[in-house]
Image (cartoon, rainbow, N blue to C red):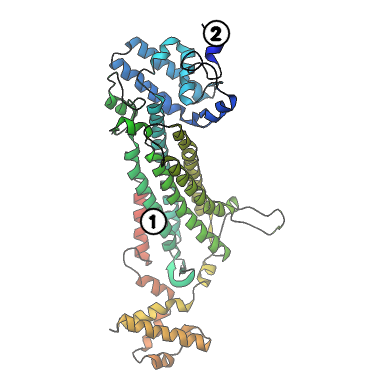
Amino acid sequence: MPSSEAVTGARGGLFGAGGRFKGGTDPIMEKFNESISFDKRMWDQDIRGSVAYAKAIVMAGIITEEEGNLLVEGLGKVSQEWSTGTFAIKPGDEDIHTANERRLTEIIGPVAGKLHTGRSRNDQVATDTRLWTVEAEREILKDIATFLTVGAEFASEHMDILMAGYTHLQPAQPIRFSHWLMSHLAAVMRDADRLQSMIPRANMCPLGSGALAGNAFGVDREFLARELGFDGVTSNSIDATCDRDFVVEFLMWNTMLLTHLSQLAEDLIITNLLKGVTIDDAYATGSSLMPQKKNPDALELLRGKAGIALGRAVGLTATLKGLPRAYNKDLQEDKIPLFEGVDTVKDCLAIATGVIATMKLNPEMLMKALCPEMLATDLADYLVRKGVPFRETHHISGACVRLAEESNVSIDTLTLEQLQNIDSRFGEDVMDVWDYEVSVERKNSIGGTARSSVQKQIDDCLAYAATL
């Protein structure tokens, strides 16, 4: 009979020597194999899953009601230790599941060994991960709501400010600053839509699938789903234990959101360089050498996080692509990118929200970037309103731009005579074209840069954020 020390071994009491294995694992393998160092953050989900499963096996007649109550009471004590920071991780606690079961055994004794009847760590970890992911996604939606609210309110407060709109990073047309800001919020609203659509796919209960073949004790999986707040149960036990689509989908979504925040950051970095906005000191750093420097490091880090996010999504997808059915240890590699992805996106949303809430606009510098050539399209539109086909007016306006360039003057200084020499249909009222505010207010279609259009975008955004 092996000694108790031999049974415990390097593997820990739950999977020690004396069963399938003759001895303990190589200490390097112990370190290589463990996941408790990172999956311990799922302690609450793991305990809740075990509480639900304890109730389910009572209902199935596998254990008595008294034993079920003892399990639930013991799991409550384990939960209390985690919540108060007194839970002690011990050698052999390979993952959060074995750690919790080991501690439960210490608290209530051998009855703890009945909890795992019909259950595998395969369906257990799938359950924990889905619960954790869905809860994280719902928290992120709240962070997005805050970001959208702060951004929309900032846009509303600065409705009167005009700035240059760009294409190809070249001056294009005058727009409202609020319109520009709302363009970035529109992208994040799409991100929120996508995240909301992902939650129902992730929120399906795999518990009761066993290792792969299903549960042999008649456990009521629909009860488990209801007890844990899932929307339903997974349809195939093999797929349920190895499906990590919901993790990959989150990481790809994460990449898209951070890409949008990166684009916002880049725009603000450029506008900060042109002195159109001033980033608050709270989100800037200095130079170790140059005393005058104020670097927009928060924005630069926001810009940089998107690339790392893409790496996490591609990395896990590559891990999954060659896996046979069903569970394989490779799937343990989903946790770190998932946890890092959630932490990063929450930090980025908080930073982006803070940057917008505290930045100061410099209206004079934003207006300085406007140039009369940006009204060349308005000049073409002037003739369109007189019945001239746009393709013709486009060439006429282009000829006016060329004349101004060749004369080394601004296009708005061309005389009526010079304009009429290009096209006789220009009238005296053409000089009214050179007004940025008038140009902006003409763009009053849905989504446009006119005050009424931008206000609707702001109102819609605030209303949407309130639903998240």
| Circles 2 and 1: CB atoms closer than 8 Å | no
Residue 230 falls in image quadrant: top left
Residue under label 2: 3
Q: Nearer the viewer, residue 451 or 118?
A: 118
Q: Does residue 361 appear left or right of residue 462 in this picture?
A: right
Q: In the structure shown, which secondary structural element does the residue marked by tag 1 occupy?
A: helix
Sequence-wise, which precedes: disc 2 or disc 1? 2
Identify residue type, mark 1. Ala
Image position of 12 with respect to 331: above or below: above
Q: How far across and how far down the image is residue 361, in percent?
A: 52, 61
Image position of 21 with respect to 399: above or below: above
Q: How far across and how far down the image is residue 236, in percent?
A: 29, 32
Q: Nearer the viewer, residue 155 or 274?
A: 274
Q: Is residue 281 visible?
A: yes
Q: How far across and how far down the image is residue 401, in percent?
A: 45, 83
Q: Is residue 142 visible?
A: no
Q: Nearer the viewer, residue 65 or 366?
A: 65
Image position of 187 with respect to 404: above or below: above
Quadrant of the frame with the C terminus: top left
Residue under label 1: 186
Q: In the structure shown, which secondary structural element does the residue marked by tag 2 occupy?
A: loop
Q: CA distance from mark 2 to mark 1?
A: 66 Å
Q: Residues within 10 Å of mark 1 (few under 14, many from 20)?
A: some
Q: Does residue 324 appear left or right of residue 340 in this picture?
A: left
Identify residue type, mark 2. Ser
Residue 6 falls in image quadrant: top right
Residue most toward the top? 1
Look at 50% across and 29% down and name the residue there. 40
Q: Does residue 208 appear left or right of residue 290 in this picture?
A: left
Q: Which one is in front in this view, the residue at disc 2 or the one at disc 1?
A: 2
